[in-house]
Structure formats: C-alpha cells, structure tokens
C-alpha cells in the first residue's frame, strides 16, 4: 500500500522536529522490550518493534519442494498522539515477496469505551485470524482462516462493557483468506463480532472462558478478468481447491455471507480453542448459464499444555524456558454442488479436492523472552483432487525460529 511510506516519513519528521527522550519501552505483545522515542511531556511517542520468522518445510514423498524461507519479516511502528489518538504502520515481507504494508490504521478513542478505527487492518471475524502471527501455536493457521478475510480497508467501531466486547465495520470486501488494498467491484461489505469472556476466575474454578460469533455480509460481482473468488491452500501452502478460470470460468455473482462461531478456554497450563466457519457465496458460469449459492465449511480444535507450568492464554507467555505441547485437528468441506455439471461445473474435480482433514502435533520452546522455536508434524488427507481419485496425503514437517522485539 503506497500510503504507508509517506505517512511514516511524515510521522518521523514531526516527532524528530522537537526535543525527545530516548528510552527502553514495553513493546506490544508478548511483553518483549522494544525501542521508543517520546516527547518530554509524554504526549507523543513512537514505539518500534519487529518480528522475524524463518521456517523450514519438509514434505514426505516429494509431493512439493523442501525449502527454508523467511515466512515473515516485519517492523511495527506505533505512534501515540495525545490521550485519544494512535497510529500503527506495519511493513512486512513474506515468502520472498516485495515489502508491503499489511497494516496501516488510526485509532481514535471516544467516550464510553468506544474506539473508531480507520485504515487497513484485520476485520473482526475469525478467532485464529485475529491472533497475532507471533502467537500461533502450530506455525501455520488452520483451514478456518482460508474462509475468513485476512485484512481489508474500512472503518470500524468497537467497544466493551464488563464481559462483552463487540466490533462492527464496513469494508471494501476481500476474497476468502486474502488481503486487498482497494475495492474490487465497488460493493461494500459489513463485518461484525460479539464476544463474551468470563473475568471472574473464582466462579469458573480459575478458568477463563470466552465465546462469540463473527460474521460478514456483502455482495460480490466478478468478471472473467477478476472473478473475485479465492483458491484454498493446504497446511503446506499448496493450492488444493480453485474455481475454473479463463474467459468461461467461474465468477462471484451475488450475496456472500460468512459465519464463524468460536470459543476458547484456559485453565492453568491447559488451553483449548475452537471455531467453525461457513462461507455462502453466489457463483456463476456465464458461458454455461449456471448459477448457484455454494456453501463451504471449515473447522478446527486446538489443545495446548505448558509442561513447565506457565498459564495458557490467547497470547504467548513472556517467560524464560517455557515448554508447550500443542495438537490440532482441522477440516475443510467444499460444497458438492461445486463439482456438478461436468465441464460446466464451477470447479474441476480432477484438480480440486472435495474434502480435507488434517491432524497436527507440535512443541513450542521459549528459551528467552522474545525468542521462540517450534517443531510441528502435520498429516492431511484429501478426498478427490486428482485424476486417479484422491490427491496424495500431505505429510509435512515444519520448523520455525522466531525472534520478536
């Protein structure tokens, strides 16, 4: 997003134009130390943080190339401007791509515990998607995040009252699991989330329990040059489902509704998170005169246990020497109507899978604050997706070294 660079330079020049104090400051997320510059009265502050993730992917049976890669390399610039205004700019390079600005937004704190956010950010939908990339339990997110939006440009109003938090926003609308900087067809999309959390630990035996619902609703109308439909990926980031493409390919046509009920439960060193997502999408093959509303589902359930006794939570611990075991089961179920109609089908059953089920187990080690190493084994089985019947199973070993400051 080209807006990020000049906006960042303007902020830096404004801060450096007046006397400042340089200090060590608490960085957002995980409790690591960052770097900050602030005005003498403390009203203005620039805090800088960073994240680097180096991964290894190793596939059994040579179904894809083994590789080491820089999964994420990002800087985060957080600017405080008085008591009510703040700005975040986050440039990132991922998988060898060019640097892009993944987040750029302004928050304005309003009376009554309300916050107005404007810019490019994560819409309030998926539980796992809203979790920071630095806090992921199993290196790659589950199938659920393939169905919910990643980042979008829009406006959002959020607030909280006792055990309830909520958010509502209007966005450009992006394909499932994707990020865009501009609107594709001029049709806005609404997103909302309600989430309840128990704060009185004594009433739940020391446990923290939260549950809620995220949703989006809008209309998408694609064309041959931009169908506005996304492909879905495996845990190894290989394409496993895509719509027919080309001049007579499948395009988005009509309403799109996403729903995602979700929960988490943490008690001492144990934790459990889960969510389900459904996307209901109007689709069309104009050349064959076919149209339908397709419904795709995904789900995940993740369990965790700190062997060293740290308390489980939605974010990673700020501790030295923590050792965590994690396990997850996840599934993806594509609408059977996607494959009906022979050559007029919306998706080719010889290329795209109809179902996928995945099981993963892993270990996370936190030797020092800000340093995390992860080892994950994941086995995914598919229905369909190959000329001979089923796509070969994906047996994948993932390793990650993560440094955050």
Image: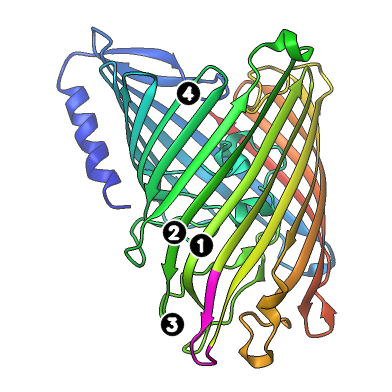
Give the mark nearest the N terminus, 3 or 2.
Answer: 2
Q: Tags 4 and 1 in contact by the CB under 8 Å rule?
A: no
Residue that badge 3 annotates: 224
Query: Where residue 301 sits: x, y (%)?
Result: 77, 42
Q: Let me know if residue 405 appears in the view.
A: no
Residue plotted at (65% across, 19% down):
198
Looking at the rendered structure, the secondary structure element under dot 4 is strand
- Marks 1 and 2 sit apart, C-alpha to C-alpha, by 5 Å
Residue that badge 2 annotates: 218
Looking at the rendered structure, the secondary structure element under dot 3 is loop
> Which of these two is toward me, 276 or 162?
162
> Which of these two is toward me, 258 or 356?
258
Q: Is residue 239 above or below residue 204?
A: below
Q: Tags 2 and 4 in contact by the CB under 8 Å rule?
A: no
- Marks 4 and 1 sit apart, C-alpha to C-alpha, by 28 Å
Residue that badge 4 annotates: 160
Give the mark nearest the N terminus, 4 or 1.
Answer: 4
Q: Which residues are magenta?
A: 282-289
Residue that badge 1 annotates: 256
């Amino acid at each position: 997003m080209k807006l990020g660079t000049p906006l960042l330079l303007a902020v830096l020049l404004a801060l450096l134009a007046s006397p400042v104090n340089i200090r060590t400051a608490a960085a957002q997320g995980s409790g690591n130390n960052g770097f900050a510059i602030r005005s003498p009265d403390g009203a203005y502050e620039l805090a800088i943080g960073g994240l680097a993730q180096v991964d290894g992917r190793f596939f059994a049976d040579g179904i894809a190339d083994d590789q080491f890669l820089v999964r994420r390399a990002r800087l985060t610039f957080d600017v405080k401007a008085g008591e009510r205004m703040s700005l975040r700019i986050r440039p990132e390079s991922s998988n060898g791509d060019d640097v892009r600005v993944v987040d750029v937004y302004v928050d304005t704190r309003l009376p009554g515990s309300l916050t107005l956010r404007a810019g490019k950010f994560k819409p309030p939908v998926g539980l796992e998607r809203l979790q920071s990339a630095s806090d992921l339990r199993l290196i790659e997110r589950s199938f659920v995040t393939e169905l919910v939006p990643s980042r979008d440009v829009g406006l959002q109003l959020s607030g909280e009252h006792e055990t309830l938090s909520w958010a509502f926003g209007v966005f450009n609308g992006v394909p499932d699991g994707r990020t865009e900087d501009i609107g594709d067809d001029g049709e806005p999309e609404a997103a909302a989330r309600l989430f309840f959390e128990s704060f009185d630990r004594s009433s739940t035996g020391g446990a923290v329990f939260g549950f809620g619902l995220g949703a989006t609703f809008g209309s998408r109308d694609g064309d041959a040059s931009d169908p506005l439909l996304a492909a879905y990926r495996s845990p190894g980031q290989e394409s496993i489902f895509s719509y027919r493409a080309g001049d007579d390919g499948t395009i988005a046509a009509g309403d799109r509704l996403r729903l995602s009920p979700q929960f988490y439960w943490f008690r001492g060193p144990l934790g459990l998170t889960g969510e389900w997502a459904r996307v209901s999408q109007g689709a069309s093959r104009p050349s064959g005169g076919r149209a339908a509303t397709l419904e795709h589902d995904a789900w995940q359930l993740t369990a965790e246990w700190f062997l060293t006794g740290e308390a489980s939570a939605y974010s990673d611990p700020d501790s030295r020497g923590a050792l965590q075991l994690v396990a997850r089961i996840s599934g993806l179920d594509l609408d059977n109507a996607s494959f009906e109609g022979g050559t007029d089908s919306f998706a080719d059953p010889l290329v795209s899978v109809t179902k996928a089920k995945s099981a993963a187990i892993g270990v996370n080690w936190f030797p020092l604050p800000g340093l995390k190493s992860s080892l994950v084994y994941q086995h995914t089985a598919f229905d369909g997706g190959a000329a001979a019947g089923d796509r070969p199973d994906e047996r994948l070993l993932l390793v990650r070294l993560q440094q955050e400051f």
